[in-house]
Amino acid sequence: MSKTLTASDRKSLIRLASALPAGSPERRAILSSLSKRAREYDSRDVAKQIDRAKTLSGVDPALAKHIVTTGLDDGVVPDDVIPMGKTTVSAGKLKPSQTTMQLPKTLGMAIAMLLGKMPLGGDLGAIISSDNHILDGHHRWSAAIAAGGPGVSVGGYKAKMPGAELIKVLNIVTKGVFGRNKGNPGTGNISSYTPANVRKALAKMVESGTDRLSAADVEKALTLLGGSVEDGIEQMAANIASMPTSVPAWAPDRADMPVIDGKDLPDTAKVLNKGLVNWNTPITPQDRRAMARLASSLPKGSPERRAILAGLSDQDQLRNLLLKADWNLRSADGQASYSGDREAARKIRKAISLVQGILKSL
């Protein structure tokens, strides 16, 4: 187990680093060590984890817990906020994000909706991305279309983020907030949702019912839908034909998708709306180089120079640091101008220009 550095240890290492030649391997090693010890995870760990979160199995539970509690640590609230709230939309405008779906389950739920045993449409208990992909509730969604057509109204929580990125955040929330480390298994395939297969499955249900519905129940529901059993079958087949079935390339297997139940949606919305999940992209390599140039231009021993050299690389922490540095530099510029030290004033103004340039790029 590595030793925990005391404040005195850190000060000693910083003094040692400042005494070493700039750019030397020894200096870099010390500063890198200080940066890694200062935080349990650095921004590179977070960036790599966010990329791996395309699948639930790619999420480290411990790192997920860190990410879902550090969104506000930089003091800049808006950067990690994902607006999320209740919405209603026509079911036909929504798109699936999983391939594993069971046609008999969808048809059974559709029959139950027609009989009034389940609400027709209504709340899917699902999260919807900004590009209208549903990330759960696929069977209820497809059943609503089967029973009521693509125009039936359904509801859920809509997040202002595209599905390809939202699934990463929600996989991290699944493990980091709700502590669910395994996904739900899935069987079947959405490619089986064809009019021919619907007719075949419904004919079987009319003959022998299901484990939850009698044959008489099925006949009654289909008659309510189409006026007769035969026309009801044709209407449901046509409704299923209108259902979007194209699944995006970014969608993982069902077992690697988020596991967030309907009862979890208010808490999920709260976490995303407050910006608690530290998902935003860290500082770029170009900004890292700009930081190095800035550090070399600042007065040796200044708190700002030491903080930069210690590896403070989070973009929003950097922004706050640069704003403070800009204030201090402008104060120093005033003092240098007052004392008549033109050379000092020139160097300080050059540093101010660098600070302003980096701030504009963030």
Image (cartoon, rainbow, N blue to C red):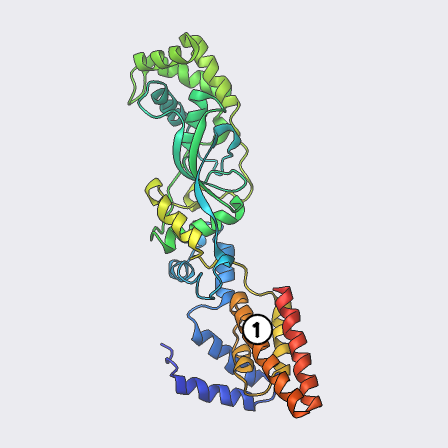
Q: Residue at x 28, y 22 (%)?
A: 212
Q: What amino acid is at disc 1?
A: Leu
Left or right of 157 on screen, residue 289: right
Q: Residue at x 47, y 15 (%)?
A: 235
Image x and y of residue 285, in percent: 62, 67
Question: Looking at the image, is 241 positioned above or below residue 335?
Answer: above
Q: Residue at x 49, y 86 (%)?
A: 14
Residue found at the very far top of the displayed protein: 228
Answer few, some or many: residues within 10 Å of disc 1's Cα (few below 14, many 20 plus, some between 14 and 19). Answer: many
Residue 196 shows up from this direction: no
Near-viewer residue (84 or 284) = 84
Image x and y of residue 310, in percent: 51, 78
Q: Quadrant of the N terminus?
A: bottom left
Residue 337 shows up from this direction: yes
Question: Looking at the image, is 56 positioned above or below residue 186?
Answer: below
Near-viewer residue (151 or 200) = 151
Residue found at the very far front of the displayed protein: 338
Read off the residue under disc 1.
322
Q: Secondary structure at mark 1?
A: helix
Image x and y of residue 172, in percent: 42, 53
For residue 290, what is the image quadrant? bottom right
Image x and y of residue 266, in percent: 36, 45
For residue 332, what is the image quadrant? bottom right
Q: Quadrant of the C terminus?
A: bottom right
Left or right of 222 on screen, residue 362: right
Q: Residue at x 39, y 33 (%)?
A: 123
Near-viewer residue (280 or 326) = 326
